[in-house]
Image (tube, rainbow, N blue to C red):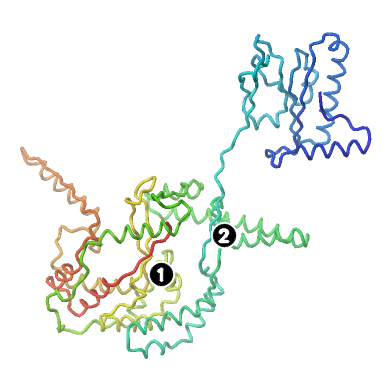
Amino acid sequence: MKLWALPVNKQEKKNTEKTRRDGMKESLPRGISALAVCAVYITTDSQFQREYQDLLLEHLVQSVDFLRSQYPEIGIVLTGDFNRINVNSILRGNDLAQIIDFSTTREGATLDLLITNSKLQEHYQKPQVMSPLGFSYHNSTLWKPIVNVTTKNSVKYHVGRPITKTGIQSLGTWLQKQDWHEVLECEDTQKKADTFYAMFDSVSNVCFPIKKKKVHSNDKPWITPHIKDLISARQSAFYTNKTEWRRLRNAVKREISKAKTSYHAERIRVLQQTEPRKWHQQIKLVTNNTKSELRLDIPGIDDGDSKGKANAINTMFANVSAHIEPLDRNKLTSFLPAEADVPYLFPWDVYSELKKVNPSKAGGPDGIKPQLVKEFAYELSTPIADILNCSFQQGIVPNQWKKAVVVPIPKTNPPNIEKLRPVSLTSIFSKVAESFVSKWIVDDIGSFIDVRQFGNVPGVSTNHYLLNLIHYLHLGAEKSRNVSTVVLTDFSKAFDLINHTLLIEKMIDVGVRRTIVPWICDFLNNRQQCVKGA
């Protein structure tokens, strides 16, 4: 029998400490500071048991007492062949329990015992009897740990331009000093756009520098980059400056408490203002009960090859309309010269549209965030109005407005590459231009829109259609011997498969003002896209 004995001198205590350190695992269960394992074998010799039983039990009790006094959070295991010896003296007062409740020999006797304390027992399953090893007389005992399945805390890096108050103030000061003569003096639409973006990007790089942010999959939703910076500074100060470490420790606690309070308050505010169908989603956010990240498996592409997945998805989206002939202006009916001038936009017209931008929406590939567009709508209205007027006059759309970042949204779970919904993120200024064009088109073709059309019509929704359908069915039900039949049709990839040449011809036929037809044609030509978030 081998057990840590009571140290009789300093050297023996030193050796005991070394044995303890060498025997410890690299990682112990939470709440367990050390682990002591004792293998016991008591012979079946009756004379030995009569002479040494009490001495052996006393030795075990004293050793356990010593270990518990030196290491209060220790886990203790006494196991082996006790040969029917009475172990009640070990169990009493030591928070120990014998947990073998099955026979450990071929004859049905329980000779092998497993004695442990409650601290360690809560981390292990109930012991199981196994077959003997070789020709052994004793059965084997399996004592398995409780394995807690934890999600791997994966790390991702997000690269972006954080919007700070200082940066907004600096950008505002710069914008107020601009007269935009560099943009206004250009005669070509593309040159105007290039000059504007060059000027804006140069100051954005100074006011909002690009930063790389580390994001863990297990981060709490209220953890902000500022809190992470404080935690990093606190960890560094721990080894160099204890006073600074204590200050940062308290600062981290305060910031986390404030972040939690503001996060939950914002979630409750959203719940008070949102519609009922979004309540379930908000409740899941408040309780941090969100779904795990979906994984898209594409045959022939490694799971970690994000670039390969993005290219495969992009190719799949592009192939949907690959067989459709591109717009051919030579096949269009003659629509020039136009009977009127292109509508002219004043800066205050553009200002009204820029103020309507939703700052919480994602930005487009030009890197200009909606928050900044809305904040500085007045300062940006002059150059954007000039670019728009030149664009409509020349029938040319800037290349920056023809680019899109496509985010694939899975329709099924698990995701399938054939069942993805593309959501395109385009430039905010491109959307502003589209809003003006769409208003002009609706004004021109309003008389041709069927009164039974409920989609893509301002002020009308599917609720109106459902009311109209129910009314129609009720009218039919009032007629005798009448049967109503509902036929539902869904066109797959309806917008992607539209022939652009045919579309422009129809627009001309129904009376769309001819001054904006060249702009629409250029808007549909030579577009570029990339896939994000594969």
Above or below residue 502? Residue 385 is below
Query: Residue furthest toward the left?
Result: 481
Q: Quadrant of the C terminus?
A: bottom left
Instruction: Residue under label 1, please give it.
Output: 365
Q: Where on the picture, by quarter, is residue 434?
A: bottom left
- Please tell me how many numbered marks the rendered image carries: 2
Above or below residue 236? Residue 350 is below
Residue 492 shows which numbered tag?
none
- Residue nearest the observer in this picture, 45 or 471: 45
Above or below residue 184? Residue 289 is above
Q: Where on the picture, by quarter, is residue 43?
A: top right
Query: In the rendered structure, which amino acid carries the disc numbered 1?
Result: Pro
Q: Determine whether the residue tagged by mark 1 lies in a helix, strand or loop.
A: loop
Query: In the rendered structure, which amino acid carries the disc numbered 2?
Result: Lys
Q: Quadrant of the N terminus?
A: top right
Instruction: Residue under label 2, please give it.
Output: 214
Q: Residues within 10 Å of mark 1 (few under 14, many from 20)?
A: many
- Residue nearest the observer in this picture, 177 or 241: 241
Give the image location of residue 366, x and y in percent.
41, 72
Q: Residue at x 55, y 68 (%)?
A: 211
Residue 109 left/right relative to 198: right
Give the image location of residue 38, x and y in percent.
77, 27
Residue 425 left/right relative to 100: left
Q: Residue at x 39, y 86 (%)?
A: 183
Q: Where on the picture, by quarter, is residue 498?
A: bottom left
Label whose residue precedes the other's in the sequence (2 or 1) = 2
Residue 46 left/right relative to 105: right
Residue 313 left/right relative to 477: right
- Residue nearest the observer in this picture, 379 or 118: 118
Q: Residue at x 78, y 25 (%)?
A: 94
